Image: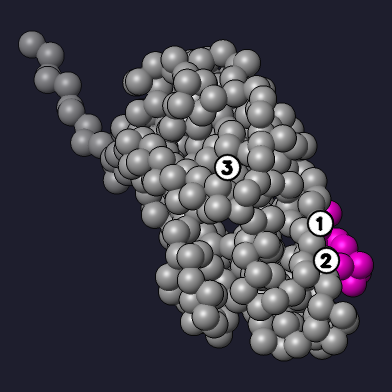
Amino acid sequence: MSAPAIRRLPTRRLVLATAAALAAGAALPALAQPIGNAATPVRILVGFPPGGGTDAIARALADKLKDQLGQPVVVENRAGAGGQIAAQALKAAPADGHTLFLSHDHTISILPQVTKAPGFEPAKDFVPVAGFATFVNALAVSGGTPARSLPEYVTWVKSQGGKGNVGVPAPASVPEFAVKVIGQKWGLDLAAAPYRGSAPMMADMLGNQIGAGVGSIPDFIENHKAGKIRVVAVMGNARQAALPEVPTFAELGLAGFEDVPYYGLFAPAGTPQPVLDRLGDAVAKVIAQPDVRERLTAMGLAVGYMPQQQLAQRERAYTATWARIIKASGFQPQ
């Protein structure tokens, strides 16, 4: 009878290699759960030019979403008309989860109220995917003005005959209506100068072509911290963590700007619920990552996950708040 075969015990190297392979295999389903065909990119439409706050936020998310979904995620700028062009592109896209729209309040909540024929109806044509942050708008003054605060800006405008131009990133936007309210409060004849996004507005502010601008904190914060412009007042009901030295409008005597806008992702209506759930889960995991939260917070955002229904409720509430302000201003849809 032949001797029994000797059973060789696995070496330490083999055990470790096997364990690593098993761990990697177990991790794959959690990381690589693509939307449809893994080779087909997920597009994130942005309604403003490259270089602005919304574009930077979209790219920060896209960079991490590709890892969660296991497929390419690309940012596609469809700039123009305050996000209207991008929104129309979303409406026309297949409802398969491969096309998303990253938007703040303007295109979703404000534009349909101030435009006679925007070419889309958010409640009918879109479905929320997930929200991931809120933010505040602010008044900033250019480096060419002597003002270091809102009272100093008011004094400076009065010394210029009481008239001034204030840049806004889009016509008929919250910043434009804010310019009118600010002027009324302090007896100034302020005219809103609309731009095609925050990037060209910022270029003119940095070039001292315009004395002030109203836009979002993400639009202003980098140049404020560099001393090139000065944020002198913020909306919202509290000072911002990224700019603790800047007072709120309410502190300075102007109430009514407490409700804060939001950032969220939207998909075409009819997108299957399992796809929306997968995308929402991916967003939640991305913004939970410390480096992402740190990056978005540094841009002036208050980071916080809003599931689909919560984003829908936030959208409706913000729309109602500004509907009252727009009506009181006498603005007629154009």
Colour convention: one colour
Looking at the rendering, the stretch of residues picked out in magenta corresponds to 200-210
Within the magenta stretch, is there residue 92?
no
- Is residue 25 at least partly visible in the picture? no
Which amino acid type is marked by label 1?
Ala
The Cα atoms of the two marked residues, 2 and 3, are separated by 22 Å
Q: Position of residue 135 (x, y in %)?
A: 51, 59
Residue at the disc numbered 2? 165
305 horizontally vs 226: left or right: left
Amino acid beneath label 2: Asn
What amino acid is found at the position of numbered circle 3 in the picture? Ile
Question: Mark 1 touching mark 2, by CB under 8 A?
Answer: yes
The answer to whether any part of residue 68 appears in the image is yes
Q: Residue at label 3?
A: 110
Who comes first in sequence, dot 3 or dot 1?
3
Could you say which quadrant of the image residue 181 lies in?
bottom right
**Residue at horizontal 62 percent and vertical 74 percent from the top:** 185
Tell me the element at label 3. helix
Residue 85, x across and y down, in percent: 71, 29
Which residue carries the number 1 mark? 193
Main secondary structure found in the magenta portion: helix
Q: Name the residue located 78 percent from the left edge and 70 percent from the top edge.
A: 189
Rounded to the nearest angstrom, the CA distance separating label 3 from label 1 is 18 Å
Q: Which of 113 and 135 lies nearest the eye of the viewer? A: 113
**Residue in the picture at 70% in, 41% down:** 82
Closer to the chain start, of discs 2 and 3, is 3
Measured along the vertical axis of the image, is residue 106 above or below residue 2?
Answer: below
